[in-house]
Amino acid sequence: YSITAIILAASGFGVWSLAIAYILQVGLQIICYWSFAKWRPRLEFDVKIALEMFHYGKYIVAGSILMFFRKNVANVAIGKFLGLKELGFYILSLRLANFASGYLIGRLSRVLFPAFSKVEGDREYLGEVFLRVIKYVSIIAFPFGIGLSLIGGDFLRIAYGDKWIPA
């Protein structure tokens, strides 16, 4: 990707070099996956599997919809009643406050979801492991949040400039 983007940029494609390089990267990945994968998709429908997938996925979809509204209701209200400038301050402060826990959980979820799915039958053990993960994430995230609240103004001034101090 990088080599292609650099060559295209040097050839005068400008910003389009990034888009073209990305499309070529994804296209090459698809060709590789198709070449090396033994499984091929077929057009068939199994009602039993579809119902099983629906029963599993309905809670994930419902949770995702609720999470979307929970995350965006405040943004809509702040933007509507206080204005876009204040919304920008709010979003920046929220992102900084949630950075440590969000970053850690985002990375850990790639490993933890498959691990949790292997022990899903043992709810007690699953609960213990889940609480242990939350404990370790908190050990890192809480001090980060406290430190950020103590040096927040200075951090914003250095990282973003004086105009972002209200965040």
Image (cartoon, rainbow, N blue to C red):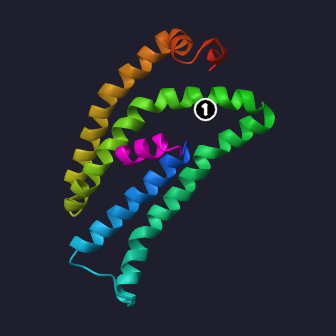
- Looking at this view, is 94 or 162 the one in front? 162
- Looking at this view, is 37 or 73 the one in front? 37
Farthest front residue in view? 11
Bin the neighbour count of mark 1 within 10 Å (Cα to Cα): few under 14, some 14-19, many 20 and up.
Answer: some
Apparent side of residue 99 relative to residue 82 in the rendered image (left or right): left
Q: Is residue 119 above or below residue 128?
A: below
Quadrant of the image occupied by residue 80:
top right
Task: Examine the residues drawn in magenta and state their main secondary structure.
Answer: helix
What's the magenta region? 1-12
Count how many numbered circles sit on residues in the image: 1
Apparent side of residue 91 relative to residue 126 in the rendered image (left or right): right
Q: At 71% from the left edge and 42% from the top edge, which residue is drawn?
A: 76
Residue 114: x and y in percent read 25, 57
Residue 6: x and y in percent read 41, 41
Q: Which residue type carries mark 1?
A: Ile
Residue 124: x and y in percent read 22, 53
Residue 105: x and y in percent read 35, 41
* Residue 11 drawn in magenta: yes
Q: Quadrant of the C terminus?
A: top right
Residue to which mark 1 is pinned? 91
* Residue 151 drawn in magenta: no
Q: Is residue 30 above or below residue 8?
A: below
Q: At 71% from the left edge and 27% from the top edge, which residue is drawn?
A: 86
Q: Secondary structure at mark 1?
A: helix
Q: At 72% from the left edge and 35% from the top edge, which residue is drawn?
A: 78
- Looking at this view, is 164 or 86 the one in front? 164
Q: Is residue 67 above or below residue 158?
A: below
Apparent side of residue 26 relative to residue 108 in the rendered image (left or right): right
Q: At 54% from the left edge and 48% from the top edge, which residue is drawn?
A: 16
- Looking at this view, is 34 or 161 the one in front? 34
Quadrant of the image occupied by residue 104:
top left
